[in-house]
Image (spheres, rainbow, N blue to C red):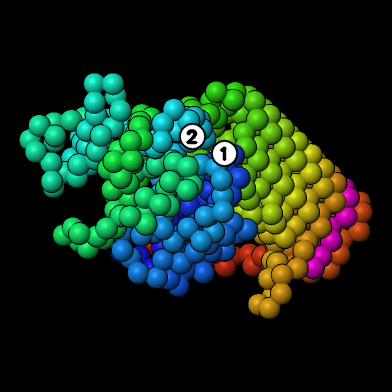
Amino acid sequence: MRSALPKAMHPVAGRPMINHLVSACEQVFDRIVVVVGPDMPAMERAVAPHATVVQAERLGTGHAARMAAPLLRDFAGDVAVLYADNPLITVPTIRKLVEKRAEAGLALLAMRPADPGRYGRLVTEPSGDVTRIVEWADASGAERAIGLCNAGVVCAPAADLFRWLDAVGNDNSKGEYYLTDIVGLAVADGRRVVAEEASEAELAGANSRAELALLEAGMQTRLREAAMAGGATLTAPETVFLSWDTRLGQDVSIAPNVVFGPGVTVEDAVEIRAFSHLEGCLVRSGAVIGPFARLRPGTEVGREAHVGNFVELKAATLAEGAKANHLSYLGDVTVGARANIGAGTITCNYDGVHKHRTEIGAGAFIGSDTALVAPVRVGARALVAAGSVITEDVPDDALAIARGRQATKPGKGFKGKRPTDTKGSN
Protein backbone atom coordinates (compact mmCIF):
# COMPACT_ATOMS: atom_id res chain seq x y z
CA MET A 1 0.00 0.00 0.00
CA ARG A 2 3.04 2.30 0.45
CA SER A 3 1.39 3.86 3.49
CA ALA A 4 2.09 4.63 7.15
CA LEU A 5 -1.47 3.43 7.80
CA PRO A 6 -2.00 -0.33 8.34
CA LYS A 7 -3.64 -1.80 5.25
CA ALA A 8 -6.78 -2.87 7.08
CA MET A 9 -7.28 0.68 8.37
CA HIS A 10 -7.66 2.14 4.90
CA PRO A 11 -11.27 3.26 4.51
CA VAL A 12 -13.89 1.89 2.17
CA ALA A 13 -17.06 4.00 2.03
CA GLY A 14 -15.74 6.07 4.92
CA ARG A 15 -15.04 3.13 7.25
CA PRO A 16 -11.81 1.16 7.84
CA MET A 17 -11.81 -2.19 6.04
CA ILE A 18 -11.35 -4.06 9.30
CA ASN A 19 -14.52 -2.55 10.76
CA HIS A 20 -16.63 -3.71 7.81
CA LEU A 21 -15.42 -7.25 8.44
CA VAL A 22 -15.77 -7.11 12.23
CA SER A 23 -19.31 -5.78 11.90
CA ALA A 24 -20.27 -8.74 9.70
CA CYS A 25 -18.58 -11.22 12.03
CA GLU A 26 -20.37 -9.80 15.08
CA GLN A 27 -23.65 -11.02 13.57
CA VAL A 28 -22.39 -14.61 13.28
CA PHE A 29 -19.74 -15.38 15.90
CA ASP A 30 -19.70 -15.32 19.70
CA ARG A 31 -16.07 -14.36 20.04
CA ILE A 32 -13.72 -12.35 17.82
CA VAL A 33 -9.93 -12.16 18.01
CA VAL A 34 -8.06 -9.78 15.71
CA VAL A 35 -4.44 -10.54 14.86
CA VAL A 36 -2.51 -7.31 14.35
CA GLY A 37 1.06 -6.43 13.51
CA PRO A 38 3.41 -4.72 15.97
CA ASP A 39 2.89 -1.04 16.76
CA MET A 40 -0.69 -0.81 15.50
CA PRO A 41 -2.50 1.02 18.34
CA ALA A 42 -4.98 2.58 15.90
CA MET A 43 -6.01 -0.89 14.76
CA GLU A 44 -6.44 -2.09 18.32
CA ARG A 45 -8.65 0.91 19.10
CA ALA A 46 -10.67 0.41 15.94
CA VAL A 47 -11.65 -3.18 16.81
CA ALA A 48 -12.26 -2.64 20.53
CA PRO A 49 -13.76 -4.12 22.62
CA HIS A 50 -12.72 -7.29 20.77
CA ALA A 51 -9.48 -8.96 21.80
CA THR A 52 -6.31 -8.42 19.82
CA VAL A 53 -3.10 -10.40 19.66
CA VAL A 54 0.16 -9.25 18.08
CA GLN A 55 1.98 -11.20 15.39
CA ALA A 56 5.46 -9.83 16.06
CA GLU A 57 7.05 -11.63 13.10
CA ARG A 58 5.34 -11.86 9.71
CA LEU A 59 5.71 -15.59 9.15
CA GLY A 60 2.66 -16.31 7.04
CA THR A 61 -1.09 -16.76 7.31
CA GLY A 62 -0.87 -20.02 9.25
CA HIS A 63 1.44 -18.40 11.77
CA ALA A 64 -0.93 -15.42 12.11
CA ALA A 65 -3.89 -17.71 12.81
CA ARG A 66 -1.83 -19.63 15.35
CA MET A 67 -1.30 -16.39 17.32
CA ALA A 68 -4.99 -16.50 18.32
CA ALA A 69 -4.73 -20.00 19.77
CA PRO A 70 -4.13 -19.00 23.42
CA LEU A 71 -7.40 -17.04 23.41
CA LEU A 72 -9.47 -19.76 21.71
CA ARG A 73 -8.07 -23.15 22.74
CA ASP A 74 -10.79 -23.52 25.40
CA PHE A 75 -13.51 -22.80 22.84
CA ALA A 76 -15.59 -25.85 21.96
CA GLY A 77 -17.30 -24.59 18.81
CA ASP A 78 -16.20 -23.81 15.28
CA VAL A 79 -13.53 -21.23 14.51
CA ALA A 80 -13.28 -19.35 11.22
CA VAL A 81 -10.25 -17.49 9.92
CA LEU A 82 -11.01 -14.42 7.81
CA TYR A 83 -8.93 -11.63 6.30
CA ALA A 84 -9.05 -7.98 7.30
CA ASP A 85 -8.82 -6.76 3.70
CA ASN A 86 -12.08 -8.51 2.67
CA PRO A 87 -14.56 -5.74 3.59
CA LEU A 88 -17.22 -6.84 1.08
CA ILE A 89 -17.85 -10.28 2.55
CA THR A 90 -21.47 -10.51 3.69
CA VAL A 91 -23.21 -12.01 6.69
CA PRO A 92 -25.15 -14.57 4.56
CA THR A 93 -21.90 -15.84 3.05
CA ILE A 94 -20.25 -16.23 6.44
CA ARG A 95 -23.30 -18.09 7.73
CA LYS A 96 -23.24 -20.41 4.70
CA LEU A 97 -19.59 -21.17 5.44
CA VAL A 98 -20.45 -22.15 9.02
CA GLU A 99 -23.40 -24.25 7.84
CA LYS A 100 -21.18 -25.92 5.26
CA ARG A 101 -18.70 -26.86 7.99
CA ALA A 102 -21.42 -28.91 9.67
CA GLU A 103 -21.27 -31.25 6.64
CA ALA A 104 -17.52 -31.89 6.87
CA GLY A 105 -14.38 -31.51 8.96
CA LEU A 106 -13.20 -28.35 7.19
CA ALA A 107 -15.00 -25.78 5.05
CA LEU A 108 -13.46 -23.20 2.71
CA LEU A 109 -14.68 -20.21 0.77
CA ALA A 110 -13.99 -20.40 -2.95
CA MET A 111 -14.66 -18.31 -6.04
CA ARG A 112 -14.49 -18.48 -9.82
CA PRO A 113 -12.81 -15.21 -10.86
CA ALA A 114 -12.95 -14.01 -14.45
CA ASP A 115 -9.16 -14.04 -14.45
CA PRO A 116 -7.90 -16.74 -12.04
CA GLY A 117 -4.39 -15.35 -12.40
CA ARG A 118 -2.13 -16.41 -9.56
CA TYR A 119 -4.80 -17.58 -7.14
CA GLY A 120 -4.36 -21.00 -5.56
CA ARG A 121 -6.52 -23.65 -7.25
CA LEU A 122 -8.83 -26.09 -5.47
CA VAL A 123 -8.28 -29.64 -6.65
CA THR A 124 -11.51 -31.58 -6.10
CA GLU A 125 -12.92 -35.06 -6.45
CA PRO A 126 -15.96 -35.80 -8.66
CA SER A 127 -18.09 -35.48 -5.50
CA GLY A 128 -16.92 -31.89 -5.11
CA ASP A 129 -14.84 -32.57 -1.98
CA VAL A 130 -11.54 -30.72 -1.91
CA THR A 131 -8.41 -32.87 -1.86
CA ARG A 132 -5.81 -30.12 -1.84
CA ILE A 133 -4.97 -26.54 -2.68
CA VAL A 134 -2.17 -26.04 -5.16
CA GLU A 135 -0.48 -22.67 -5.39
CA TRP A 136 -0.13 -21.21 -8.88
CA ALA A 137 3.65 -21.36 -8.80
CA ASP A 138 3.54 -25.08 -8.07
CA ALA A 139 0.60 -25.95 -10.34
CA SER A 140 0.78 -27.98 -13.53
CA GLY A 141 -0.81 -26.76 -16.73
CA ALA A 142 -3.90 -28.85 -16.06
CA GLU A 143 -4.16 -27.52 -12.51
CA ARG A 144 -3.79 -23.90 -13.67
CA ALA A 145 -6.77 -24.50 -15.97
CA ILE A 146 -8.98 -25.12 -12.91
CA GLY A 147 -11.43 -22.23 -12.47
CA LEU A 148 -12.24 -22.81 -8.79
CA CYS A 149 -9.90 -20.68 -6.70
CA ASN A 150 -9.09 -20.41 -3.03
CA ALA A 151 -10.38 -17.32 -1.20
CA GLY A 152 -8.38 -18.12 1.93
CA VAL A 153 -11.24 -18.20 4.45
CA VAL A 154 -11.58 -21.44 6.43
CA CYS A 155 -13.81 -22.84 9.17
CA ALA A 156 -13.20 -25.90 11.38
CA PRO A 157 -13.77 -27.14 14.93
CA ALA A 158 -11.46 -25.25 17.25
CA ALA A 159 -9.58 -28.32 18.52
CA ASP A 160 -8.93 -29.63 15.00
CA LEU A 161 -8.00 -26.23 13.58
CA PHE A 162 -5.34 -25.48 16.16
CA ARG A 163 -3.99 -29.03 16.06
CA TRP A 164 -3.56 -28.72 12.29
CA LEU A 165 -2.01 -25.27 12.64
CA ASP A 166 0.53 -26.62 15.11
CA ALA A 167 1.48 -29.27 12.50
CA VAL A 168 1.93 -26.82 9.62
CA GLY A 169 5.56 -26.49 8.61
CA ASN A 170 7.50 -23.82 6.74
CA ASP A 171 9.43 -25.94 4.27
CA ASN A 172 8.81 -23.67 1.29
CA SER A 173 10.58 -20.98 -0.69
CA LYS A 174 9.38 -18.19 1.62
CA GLY A 175 9.95 -20.05 4.88
CA GLU A 176 6.40 -19.18 5.92
CA TYR A 177 3.59 -21.13 7.55
CA TYR A 178 0.66 -21.27 5.11
CA LEU A 179 -2.91 -21.59 6.34
CA THR A 180 -3.78 -23.52 3.17
CA ASP A 181 -1.60 -26.42 4.35
CA ILE A 182 -4.31 -27.44 6.81
CA VAL A 183 -6.31 -28.83 3.85
CA GLY A 184 -3.77 -31.60 3.32
CA LEU A 185 -3.62 -32.25 7.04
CA ALA A 186 -7.41 -32.54 7.26
CA VAL A 187 -7.51 -34.95 4.33
CA ALA A 188 -4.73 -37.00 5.92
CA ASP A 189 -6.90 -37.19 9.05
CA GLY A 190 -9.71 -38.65 6.97
CA ARG A 191 -11.84 -35.50 7.22
CA ARG A 192 -13.97 -34.21 4.36
CA VAL A 193 -13.02 -30.79 3.06
CA VAL A 194 -15.78 -28.88 1.30
CA ALA A 195 -16.00 -25.50 -0.43
CA GLU A 196 -18.72 -22.85 -0.33
CA GLU A 197 -18.65 -20.68 -3.44
CA ALA A 198 -19.20 -16.92 -3.37
CA SER A 199 -18.74 -14.19 -5.96
CA GLU A 200 -15.35 -12.80 -6.85
CA ALA A 201 -16.60 -9.28 -6.07
CA GLU A 202 -17.58 -10.27 -2.54
CA LEU A 203 -14.31 -12.02 -1.75
CA ALA A 204 -11.99 -9.44 -3.29
CA GLY A 205 -9.11 -8.10 -1.23
CA ALA A 206 -6.70 -5.18 -1.59
CA ASN A 207 -2.92 -5.23 -1.75
CA SER A 208 -2.52 -1.92 -3.58
CA ARG A 209 -4.19 1.46 -3.97
CA ALA A 210 -5.60 0.35 -7.31
CA GLU A 211 -7.23 -2.70 -5.71
CA LEU A 212 -8.51 -0.49 -2.89
CA ALA A 213 -10.26 1.64 -5.52
CA LEU A 214 -11.91 -1.51 -6.89
CA LEU A 215 -13.18 -2.37 -3.40
CA GLU A 216 -14.58 1.14 -3.08
CA ALA A 217 -16.36 0.77 -6.41
CA GLY A 218 -17.83 -2.55 -5.32
CA MET A 219 -19.05 -1.14 -2.02
CA GLN A 220 -20.55 1.93 -3.72
CA THR A 221 -22.47 -0.30 -6.12
CA ARG A 222 -23.87 -2.23 -3.17
CA LEU A 223 -24.82 0.94 -1.25
CA ARG A 224 -26.46 2.57 -4.27
CA GLU A 225 -28.54 -0.50 -4.99
CA ALA A 226 -29.67 -0.64 -1.36
CA ALA A 227 -30.58 3.06 -1.40
CA MET A 228 -32.71 2.71 -4.52
CA ALA A 229 -34.33 -0.49 -3.22
CA GLY A 230 -35.24 1.49 -0.10
CA GLY A 231 -37.14 4.13 -2.06
CA ALA A 232 -34.57 6.79 -2.97
CA THR A 233 -34.16 8.10 -6.51
CA LEU A 234 -30.58 8.45 -7.75
CA THR A 235 -30.71 10.20 -11.11
CA ALA A 236 -27.18 9.12 -12.04
CA PRO A 237 -26.26 6.44 -9.49
CA GLU A 238 -22.69 6.03 -10.67
CA THR A 239 -21.94 9.67 -9.72
CA VAL A 240 -23.37 9.52 -6.18
CA PHE A 241 -21.00 8.44 -3.41
CA LEU A 242 -22.47 7.11 -0.18
CA SER A 243 -20.93 6.35 3.18
CA TRP A 244 -21.31 3.02 4.93
CA ASP A 245 -23.80 4.54 7.40
CA THR A 246 -25.77 6.87 5.10
CA ARG A 247 -29.47 6.69 5.94
CA LEU A 248 -31.93 7.77 3.25
CA GLY A 249 -35.69 7.95 3.65
CA GLN A 250 -38.31 7.19 1.04
CA ASP A 251 -38.90 9.51 -1.91
CA VAL A 252 -35.54 11.18 -1.44
CA SER A 253 -34.30 12.58 -4.74
CA ILE A 254 -30.53 12.79 -5.30
CA ALA A 255 -29.17 14.58 -8.35
CA PRO A 256 -25.80 13.77 -9.96
CA ASN A 257 -22.44 14.27 -8.26
CA VAL A 258 -23.56 14.28 -4.65
CA VAL A 259 -21.17 13.02 -1.94
CA PHE A 260 -22.19 11.71 1.49
CA GLY A 261 -19.55 11.55 4.19
CA PRO A 262 -20.06 9.53 7.38
CA GLY A 263 -22.94 10.25 9.73
CA VAL A 264 -25.68 11.52 7.40
CA THR A 265 -29.39 10.89 7.90
CA VAL A 266 -31.88 12.17 5.32
CA GLU A 267 -35.58 11.88 6.05
CA ASP A 268 -38.40 11.37 3.55
CA ALA A 269 -39.12 13.55 0.51
CA VAL A 270 -35.86 15.53 0.60
CA GLU A 271 -34.38 16.87 -2.62
CA ILE A 272 -30.59 17.01 -2.81
CA ARG A 273 -29.43 18.84 -5.89
CA ALA A 274 -26.24 18.37 -7.87
CA PHE A 275 -22.69 18.76 -6.53
CA SER A 276 -23.66 18.94 -2.86
CA HIS A 277 -21.52 17.49 -0.07
CA LEU A 278 -23.03 16.29 3.21
CA GLU A 279 -21.26 14.96 6.31
CA GLY A 280 -22.34 14.39 9.91
CA CYS A 281 -25.72 16.03 9.47
CA LEU A 282 -29.48 15.49 9.71
CA VAL A 283 -31.85 16.68 6.98
CA ARG A 284 -35.52 16.70 7.92
CA SER A 285 -38.43 15.81 5.64
CA GLY A 286 -39.21 18.04 2.69
CA ALA A 287 -36.01 20.07 2.80
CA VAL A 288 -34.19 21.14 -0.36
CA ILE A 289 -30.38 21.09 -0.44
CA GLY A 290 -28.17 22.58 -3.13
CA PRO A 291 -27.00 22.65 -5.79
CA PHE A 292 -23.40 23.13 -4.66
CA ALA A 293 -24.26 23.14 -0.95
CA ARG A 294 -21.98 21.91 1.82
CA LEU A 295 -23.39 20.56 5.08
CA ARG A 296 -20.68 19.95 7.67
CA PRO A 297 -20.82 17.98 10.94
CA GLY A 298 -23.28 19.08 13.59
CA THR A 299 -25.78 20.54 11.13
CA GLU A 300 -29.52 19.96 11.26
CA VAL A 301 -31.75 21.24 8.48
CA GLY A 302 -35.41 21.43 9.48
CA ARG A 303 -38.56 20.41 7.66
CA GLU A 304 -39.18 22.29 4.40
CA ALA A 305 -36.03 24.37 4.92
CA HIS A 306 -33.95 25.44 1.91
CA VAL A 307 -30.16 25.49 1.65
CA GLY A 308 -29.13 26.81 -1.74
CA ASN A 309 -26.12 27.14 -4.00
CA PHE A 310 -22.71 27.79 -2.44
CA VAL A 311 -24.08 27.81 1.10
CA GLU A 312 -21.94 26.18 3.79
CA LEU A 313 -23.36 25.13 7.15
CA LYS A 314 -21.28 23.98 10.15
CA ALA A 315 -22.78 23.10 13.55
CA ALA A 316 -25.85 24.96 12.33
CA THR A 317 -29.52 24.39 13.06
CA LEU A 318 -32.07 25.66 10.57
CA ALA A 319 -35.59 25.39 11.90
CA GLU A 320 -38.66 24.52 9.84
CA GLY A 321 -39.07 26.61 6.71
CA ALA A 322 -35.87 28.63 7.16
CA LYS A 323 -34.09 29.64 3.97
CA ALA A 324 -30.47 30.31 3.09
CA ASN A 325 -30.54 30.22 -0.67
CA HIS A 326 -27.32 31.86 -1.84
CA LEU A 327 -23.61 32.25 -1.13
CA SER A 328 -23.52 32.17 2.68
CA TYR A 329 -21.44 30.73 5.49
CA LEU A 330 -23.44 29.84 8.60
CA GLY A 331 -21.27 28.34 11.31
CA ASP A 332 -22.22 27.77 14.96
CA VAL A 333 -25.66 29.24 14.45
CA THR A 334 -29.30 28.60 15.26
CA VAL A 335 -31.75 29.95 12.69
CA GLY A 336 -35.40 30.16 13.70
CA ALA A 337 -38.42 28.95 11.80
CA ARG A 338 -39.13 30.73 8.49
CA ALA A 339 -36.18 33.10 8.90
CA ASN A 340 -34.58 34.28 5.65
CA ILE A 341 -30.83 34.57 5.21
CA GLY A 342 -29.81 36.91 2.39
CA ALA A 343 -27.05 36.22 -0.10
CA GLY A 344 -23.52 36.77 1.16
CA THR A 345 -24.40 36.51 4.87
CA ILE A 346 -21.70 35.14 7.13
CA THR A 347 -21.54 34.35 10.82
CA CYS A 348 -18.19 35.44 12.20
CA ASN A 349 -17.96 32.60 14.69
CA TYR A 350 -14.23 32.43 15.43
CA ASP A 351 -12.21 35.07 17.25
CA GLY A 352 -8.90 33.32 16.74
CA VAL A 353 -9.13 31.43 20.02
CA HIS A 354 -12.74 30.39 20.66
CA LYS A 355 -15.88 29.61 18.66
CA HIS A 356 -19.03 31.59 19.45
CA ARG A 357 -22.66 31.08 18.47
CA THR A 358 -25.13 33.26 16.65
CA GLU A 359 -28.88 33.10 17.28
CA ILE A 360 -31.36 34.26 14.67
CA GLY A 361 -34.99 34.33 15.74
CA ALA A 362 -38.06 32.98 14.00
CA GLY A 363 -39.23 35.05 11.05
CA ALA A 364 -36.13 37.26 11.04
CA PHE A 365 -34.83 38.69 7.77
CA ILE A 366 -31.08 39.08 7.31
CA GLY A 367 -30.23 41.34 4.40
CA SER A 368 -27.63 40.48 1.81
CA ASP A 369 -23.92 40.85 2.57
CA THR A 370 -24.42 40.93 6.34
CA ALA A 371 -21.71 39.92 8.82
CA LEU A 372 -22.99 38.68 12.18
CA VAL A 373 -20.13 38.90 14.70
CA ALA A 374 -20.70 36.24 17.34
CA PRO A 375 -21.71 35.97 20.08
CA VAL A 376 -24.78 37.84 18.94
CA ARG A 377 -28.55 37.42 18.85
CA VAL A 378 -31.00 38.69 16.24
CA GLY A 379 -34.53 38.61 17.60
CA ALA A 380 -37.68 37.16 16.15
CA ARG A 381 -39.14 39.06 13.19
CA ALA A 382 -36.17 41.46 13.27
CA LEU A 383 -34.87 43.02 10.06
CA VAL A 384 -31.15 43.51 9.42
CA ALA A 385 -30.38 45.88 6.58
CA ALA A 386 -28.17 44.70 3.73
CA GLY A 387 -24.47 45.32 4.12
CA SER A 388 -24.57 45.54 7.91
CA VAL A 389 -21.92 44.37 10.37
CA ILE A 390 -23.89 43.35 13.46
CA THR A 391 -21.90 43.30 16.70
CA GLU A 392 -24.71 43.86 19.22
CA ASP A 393 -27.96 42.01 19.90
CA VAL A 394 -30.97 43.06 17.86
CA PRO A 395 -34.30 42.93 19.79
CA ASP A 396 -37.43 41.24 18.51
CA ASP A 397 -39.29 43.20 15.80
CA ALA A 398 -36.43 45.74 15.46
CA LEU A 399 -34.63 47.11 12.39
CA ALA A 400 -30.82 47.14 12.60
CA ILE A 401 -28.62 49.14 10.25
CA ALA A 402 -24.87 48.95 10.84
CA ARG A 403 -23.01 50.44 7.91
CA GLY A 404 -21.28 53.69 7.02
CA ARG A 405 -23.51 56.47 5.68
CA GLN A 406 -23.25 56.90 1.92
CA ALA A 407 -21.58 60.08 0.75
CA THR A 408 -22.40 61.31 -2.78
CA LYS A 409 -20.21 63.97 -4.46
CA PRO A 410 -22.02 65.60 -7.41
CA GLY A 411 -19.87 66.22 -10.45
CA LYS A 412 -17.01 64.06 -9.27
CA GLY A 413 -17.64 61.25 -11.74
CA PHE A 414 -15.78 60.67 -15.00
CA LYS A 415 -17.23 63.76 -16.67
CA GLY A 416 -16.62 62.22 -20.06
CA LYS A 417 -13.05 61.26 -19.13
CA ARG A 418 -13.80 57.56 -18.95
CA PRO A 419 -11.23 55.68 -21.04
CA THR A 420 -12.62 54.51 -24.36
CA ASP A 421 -10.34 51.45 -24.41
CA THR A 422 -11.85 49.06 -21.89
CA LYS A 423 -9.91 46.03 -23.07
CA GLY A 424 -9.01 43.92 -20.08
CA SER A 425 -11.38 45.70 -17.70
CA ASN A 426 -13.69 43.79 -15.34
Q: Are marks 1 and 2 in contact (CB under 8 Å)?
A: yes
Q: Position of residue 395 (x, y in %)?
A: 91, 58
Q: CA distance from mark 1 to mark 2?
A: 9 Å
Q: Residue at x 24, y 26 (%)?
A: 125
In depth, the one of 169 and 370 nearer the eye is 169
Q: Residue at x 30, y 38 (%)?
A: 187
Instruction: Check the image and name the residue furthest to the front.
Output: 189
Q: Residue at x 53, y 25 (%)?
A: 228
In this figure, which residue is indicated by the disc labeled 2?
98
In this figure, which residue is indicated by the disc labeled 1?
28
In terms of sequence position, does the residue under pointer 1 or pointer 2 come before the other? 1
Instruction: Check the image and name the residue furthest to the top.
Output: 126
In depth, the one of 142 and 214 nearer the eye is 142
Please say whether residue 148 is one of the residues in the magenta stretch. no
Q: Split into 4 quadrants, where in the image is the C terminus?
A: bottom left
**Stretch of the chain drawn in magenta:** 375-381
